[in-house]
Structure formats: C-alpha cells, structure tokens
Image (cartoon, helix red, strand yellow):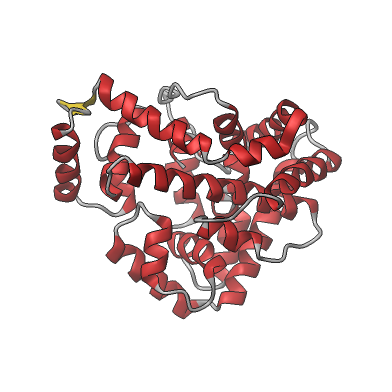
Amino acid sequence: MSYEELAAVFLTPSTPAPPSPALPTTRARRLRDAIEPIATIGWWSRAATEQFTALGLDFFGGYVWGRAAALGPDVDAGVVVSAFGVFEPTLLTSVLDGARSAASHEAVLAGREAGATDGLRAVVASTTDIDIELVESAGARLRAALDGVDGTARPLFSALRSLPIGADPHAALWRAAEMYREHRGDGNLAASVAAGLDPVEMNVLTELWLGYPIGEYSATRGFGPERIQQAVDAIEASGWVSGGVITESGRAARTAIEAATDLSQHAIIEAIGDGFDDLVGDLETIGAAVVDAQVAPADPRKRAAG
C-alpha cells in the first residue's frame, strides 16, 4: 500500500463524517486524547513511511517492529504479542519476523525517530499557531512528569523511557507523548484482563463503546469473523451486548475499565501538578494541528481507540 492509498483510507476525512464518541472528561483521558495524534505521528506521517520504505518495510511492518524494537533486538515474538495485547498472535509474529529480517534494530529505531521528528516538524512549520518554544516547553513538562513515575508492570513504557532521544524539541515531544500513550496502554490492558476479557473481547467491547459496528475495528487487529463472533457470544453471555448493541451494563463495565486505567495513571497526573490544564491546552493545540494536517486518523473513533 502506497502512502497515498494509506492516506485515502485512514487520514482523509470522509463525507459524512462518523460521529465523535462521547468520551470521559477525566484528566487522564483528556491528556491521552490530546497526545494521541502527536504520539502516533511516528507511523502515520509521510516522513515516517518514507523512512520505513527505505528500510524495506511496509506500513504494518514499520508499525510492529518500530514499537517492538524498544523491547530489544532479540525480543521474543511471544513477549511482543503479550505486550501489544490486542493483535492476532500468528499475524503479529509473522509481521515481526519479516520486518526484523529486513531491518536491523538500530536502523528501525533511528528511522522511527527521524520520521516522527520530521513529520512533527512539518506540521509545526505549516501553522502560525505553534512555535518551537511551545513544542519544547510541552515536551519538557510532560517528560519531567514521566521520568519520575514507577515503571512496574509497564513493559512498553519502561522500554521507551530507557532509550536515548535526540536534543531536537520535536523528537523530545514525540517521545514523551508516545511514552504516555504506552503507559496508558499498559494500564488499560491490565484493567481489561482484570475485568475478565480476552484480547478479542477487549477489542469488541471497545469498538461498541466507541460507536463502531461489530468487527469493523477488531478485524483491523487480524481477527477473523469466527473468532470475533466467539468474543461477541462471550460478551453477550455476560449481558454486556445484546443484538449487536452494547447494553447499559456493558457500557458500565467498559466505563469501569476506563476508570481503572485512569487510576493507574494517577502518579503522572499528580506529577504534572498545578500546570495540568495549561499543558493539556498546549498539547491539544499541537495535536489538533496534526489532525488538520491529515497525518493522524480522520475518524475520531479511531483516534479514541488508539
């Protein structure tokens, strides 16, 4: 798939636009939604795609090996499956093995950083609403909060935090944003497992919570119709889905998972302190510019799902 084809499917607004999901307005969720476009520019931007293409990787190979590389050059595929949590294991293993044979650990980490940095720099240069001082300040404030929190049971977050990062403010902000994203992802997986959900059930409950029809989001994680239907049947048995629609108790269950995820990030929110609203406002400005530049998914449900 060329970048133009990718952009046409995921990054170009559709008509009519899908409805925006009703999301919680907690501080942790607000921060998550503000940084999501910034964090994901490391695979959605044209600059990132060009870096991966030069390494012999397609979009999904760059995404998988790019995220997994933080865990080390020889990380076992089973560890990556566990850490990512919501992808079909055979597919993820195959893509990781193919990408790792095409590009070295050092090359994919360097390419990922260069693509994200160039992608974010291009967005900032395209608008008069953001200057380099704002980028530098937002990155420094977010990173300061992240550096002091405990990394227990946070494999992807802790792996990213251990990596060196260049002095470029765009690179520093992107890394801090993806660190927060992985911290929340680690927490959300733990909360979902504690609620008794397997990986496909996590996907199905989330897609219904956000307003997707059954299977539209889950299928992008490599799961086939039969496996998705098994998950639907299991959730229906719990009373959380009925007739393909999330029930009141299902919505309450997913909201409880969201609340547990928020709670798992309490230390970060506390570390940001009194400047929280100002930081979120700055990150929302930058994130909105990324969306407007069409280097983040146009579908608000996709951005909300991660």
Residue 117 locus on image (x, y percent): 70, 55
Residue 287 lies in what quarter of the image?
top right
Image mark count: 0
Q: Quadrant of the N terminus?
A: bottom left
Rendered residue at 27%/19% (across/down):
248
Question: Residue at (74%, 39%) from the top-left corner?
Answer: 126
Q: Is residue 204 above or below residue 103?
A: above
In the rendered structure, the answer to whether residue 290 lies left or right of residue 14 reads right
- Above or below residue 106? Residue 246 is above
Q: Is residue 106 above or below residue 147?
A: below
Whether residue 4 appears in this view of the structure is yes
Q: Is residue 150 left or right of residue 131?
A: left
> Image check: 147 left or right of 132?
left
In this rendered view, identify the residue nearer to me: 268 or 247: 268
- 210 above or below 162? above
Residue 195 or 115: which is nearer the viewer? Answer: 195
The answer to which image quadrant residue 231 occupies is top left
Q: Residue at coordinates 66% horizontally, 66% vertically from top-left?
A: 163
Residue 282 visible (yes or no): no
Point out residue 208 in the picture as x, y percentages from the top left corner. 30, 31
The percent position of residue 267, horizontal first and vertical second, equals 63, 41
In percent of the image, x 76 and y 28: which residue is there? 274
